[in-house]
Image (cartoon, rainbow, N blue to C red):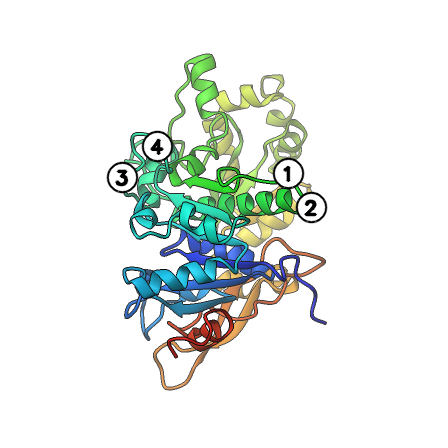
Amino acid sequence: MVRSRPLEGVRVLELGNYIAAPTAGRLLADFGAEVIKVERPGTGDELRNWRLYAGTTSMLFRTINRNKKSVVLDLKTDEGRRDVIRLASQCDIIIENFRPGTLERWGIGPDVLNEHNPALVFVRISAFGQTGPLASRPGFAAVAEAFGGLRELVGSPDQPPSRVGVSIGDSIAGLYAAFGAMMILFQSKRGQPLSLADRTIDVALNEAVFSMMESLIADYLAYGVERKRTGGRTEGIAPSNAYLCGDGKSIVVAGNSDAIFRRLMSAIDRPDLAGDPELATNDRRWLRRDELDAAISDWTSGRTSAKALEILDGAGVPAGPILTAADIVNDEQYKARNMIQYFPVDVGRSEPASVGFPGIVPVIGDRSLSIRSVGPDLGEHNREIRGRYLGGEGE
């Protein structure tokens, strides 16, 4: 059965490259919006070549630009800019992540597009936002993660700051961008007239990251505490870490709450720690975190990861394996919720390969909605978009 998608009937124009703006477009497309992705002639979105191991289009591009339509327009030409104006006049949302001022220089900034579509929602993503002394500065997620406070907290305290392994700053910004677009659409559907400023969402990569830093600033201003890197731990929470098991695999154990801590200590045969009044609260446990980690490590090292997890699960202690890509594709939980969906994809061989892609989040009902298509070939929808929205010109 094909389930309805909440955003069917919503049309989005994406003038986005790389990850942040395309992530916002992907989220809207996942739930039914028609997302028209504008790409430059010849090369298209540069993401097509990022982590490209074979073929002509990376799996990163296929993933982030799924469920979209690709049309080739040259925004540096009068014709391309006229086509953008015509498309924008027929859309509900426009998403862009050029450096601030670029669209204005090209003559297709919000003021111009607003004249042709006074209900259009503008979603603008940039390194540092559209205003302020750093507005004109370029930047990718790596810079934003450093500027937003995240990089200082990632890694071991005796090593330089590390990265989390994905462009998390871009992805967070994309989430905020999609959420902002939905807020404005919801507000406009209630019949409230909105000015251009009210319809403009300004997402800065560094602020998106900064917003995830929990009480980083408040702790500093209230107590003079500057948080530091803690490796696999989270500052102020114990015991919670990764622990090596006897089979060479590590598991994550989170004995965060007072009741869970007591169950954890009983499960690892340490009733002395479970009943120690000095460990009854989290602030006290944090002071003895090294001792607690040593006790848990001693226990896990004598068991396989599967056996350790079985015991902890039976005791009601949150714990789990550290999964690799190979583990995830075979995991029954992911399968049950349709979280890996397979498509035939060109990977540079004589025949397409069956490639799995991550499902749609959040789930509506009991399993992920189906992905309609993976990221398109460059200009795959030129004829369709021109025929439907541009009067068939340029075929």
Separation (CA) of disc 4 from disc 2: 37 Å
Mark 2 or 1, which is nearer the eye?
Answer: 2
Q: Return the x and y of residue 267 as percentages of the image width and height.
A: 64, 38
Comes first in the chain, label 2 or label 1: 1
153 w.r.t. 309: above or below: above
Residue farthest along the front direction in this orientation: 115
* Front residue (pair 41, 341): 41
Q: Label 3, on which residue? A: 137
Q: Which label sits on residue 314?
A: 2
Mark 2 or 3, which is nearer the eye?
Answer: 3
Comes first in the chain, label 3 or label 1: 3
Left or right: 137 as drawn, with respect to 118:
left
Q: Label 1, on which residue? A: 267
The amino acid type, in three-letter code, at marker 1 is Ala
Comes first in the chain, label 4 or label 2: 4
Comes first in the chain, label 2 or label 3: 3
Query: Mark 4: which secondary structure?
Result: helix
Separation (CA) of disc 2 from disc 3: 53 Å
Query: Mark 1: which secondary structure?
Result: helix
Q: Label 4, on which residue? A: 152
Q: Return the x and y of residue 354 as percentages of the image width and height.
A: 48, 77
Local packing at callout 2 (Cα closer than 10 Å; few below 14, some 14-19, many 20+) is few
The amino acid type, in three-letter code, at marker 2 is Gly
Q: Are marks 2 and 1 in contact (CB under 8 Å)?
A: yes
Separation (CA) of disc 2 from disc 1: 9 Å
Task: Report the residue at 43% width, 67% height from top.
Answer: 62
Q: Return the x and y of residue 215 as percentages of the image width and height.
A: 49, 25
Quadrant housing the N terminus: bottom right
Comes first in the chain, label 3 or label 4: 3
Q: Quadrant of residue 138?
A: top left
Local packing at callout 1 (Cα closer than 10 Å; few below 14, some 14-19, many 20+) is many
